[in-house]
Image: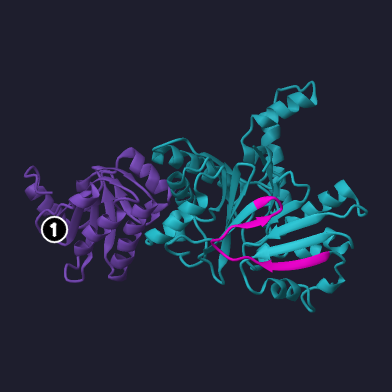
Chain colours: A purple, B cyan
Amino acid sequence: MPAAAVGECRVEMSSLRLADVMVVAPVGRVDHATAGPFERALEPSLAPSVSPGALLLDLSRVDYISSVGLRVVMTAAKQLRSRQARIAAAGLQPLVREIFEIARFNHVVELFPTMREALQALSAPALAAFDATAGTGAA
Amino acid sequence: MKRVRFWGTRGSLPVALTATDVRAKVANAVRGASGRTFASDDEVNRYLDGLEFHAAATYGGHTSCVELETGSGEYVLCDLGSGVRPFGQAALARHGIGSPQTYHVFLSHLHWDHIMGLPFFMPAYFKGNTVRIYGGHPNLEAALRRQQEKPSFPVEMSIMGAALSFTRLETDVDHQVAGMTVRLLLQRHAGDSYGYRFSSGGRTVVYTTDSEHRLDDPQETARFVELFRDADLVIFDAMYSLADAISVKADWGHSSNIVAVDLCHLAHVRHLCLFHHEPVYDDATIDRVLAETRRYEEISRTGAPLQVSAAYDGMEIDW
């Protein structure tokens, strides 16, 4: 899937499929001003036709997420779980990780320090695809 | 508005420390005092002040009851949880039974934990007193009378000697009561609940408990931001973590510390007080929630600092 930008909300987001894992990478603040567009930008990656085995959020370029942003993550988690799919996040900046822990979202989303560690835990084919594209900037 | 005094701060059900809980606190304090000597009570108190709140005190276990001291000479209460029993005793001790008083009571809703204290509110039994009960529900009086009917309670409300009145207040308009401007907002809770904005003498307090925030409705968020706008103090139901409030406990009608901070920041509130504590939380857990909430406030702050505290039975907030 080509990278998609959602410029209207000041949250840009790119998405990429690695084997059975959808990787989405929002950028910036996810708060009351941007959560709606963030949710709409996430929808294509959650569509039944896409049907990933897991959704991996690359949060390395998110510097803040508020309650409404976390609600979007919870909605995605519920949809994925209903299809026996997993949800994980990688590369959280320290402040964002703190927010996940304070909100107890570390019990909702599997958290990993890096993308590679996340893919290692989620899917061998996705990890292979990631390693094959590493350094291309595709993700 | 001069002072807010908390008589009951626990959600859903009264709780109490057990003998084991108290002994653990005492043991911890004794261990900490090992090798020290205390020449006076002041030195003892300085030592206790240096301990974490949960080590030297308790958040208490009475259900919702908050007193607003307005300076009008009449009492103002929010809710009639079990905390209204010690409030009533304190009022009687202060005035005796020969000095009639007026009590204004604003009910958030009619669930048991918010009305269970009325049968034990002694001033209501004395002729000469006046108890005026306000709320947004159409069946205020019926709900309160029902809980005192047999077989639930042996003393019916008709025995109460005070002049009782029940007034339904409309939402979203200003009412003048006890020298205050009062506004109600309908909240999301099973059977409905109402949040209150009280303004007096240039000060504003918001009492919002048993209110679930769905977060996917910007208009609902806007209504709460307007209720909270520039308030000096917001007393907020922060019973659950955000993850629980919007997943396993969705539709249970309560909110979280994270939503509390976000709404207070949007509304430029000065002081947030966490309230309606989860009954299964012990004192150390509430201390941790408070510390985490203060940290989240710091992380998420984009304007003026928001003071954050956690209510405990007996707590007073002065202006």
The chain ID associated with circle 1 is A
Residue A37 location, quadrant? bottom left
Q: Position of residue B121 (x, y in %)?
A: 80, 60
Instruction: Give the tally of numbered discs.
Output: 1
In the image, A54 versus B274, the foreground residue is: B274
| Visible residue check, residue B154 | no
Residue farthest toward the right in the current orientation of the protein: B98
Residue B143 location, quadrant? bottom right
Side (left or right) of B147 relative to A137: right
In the image, B77 versus B74, the foreground residue is: B74
Q: Which residue is mark 1?
A: A17
Side (left or right) of B52 relative to A72: right
Q: Position of residue A117 (x, y in %)?
A: 23, 47
The question of residue B71 being in magenta is answered with no
Mark 1, other Cα within 10 Å: few <14 / some 14–19 / many ≥20 = many
Q: Position of residue B125 (x, y in %)?
A: 86, 64
Q: Which residue corresponds to the image point at 70% horizontal and 23% vertical from the top-left? A: B35
Q: Which residue corresponds to the image point at 23% horizontal and 47% vertical from the top-left? A: A10
Magenta segment: B163-180
Q: Position of residue B222 (x, y in %)?
A: 42, 56
Give the residue type that dot 1 points to: Arg
Q: Which residue corresponds to the image point at 30% horizontal and 54% vertical from the top-left? A: A35
Q: Which residue corresponds to the image point at 48% horizontal and 42% vertical from the top-left? A: B292
Q: Is residue B225 above or below residue A77?
A: above
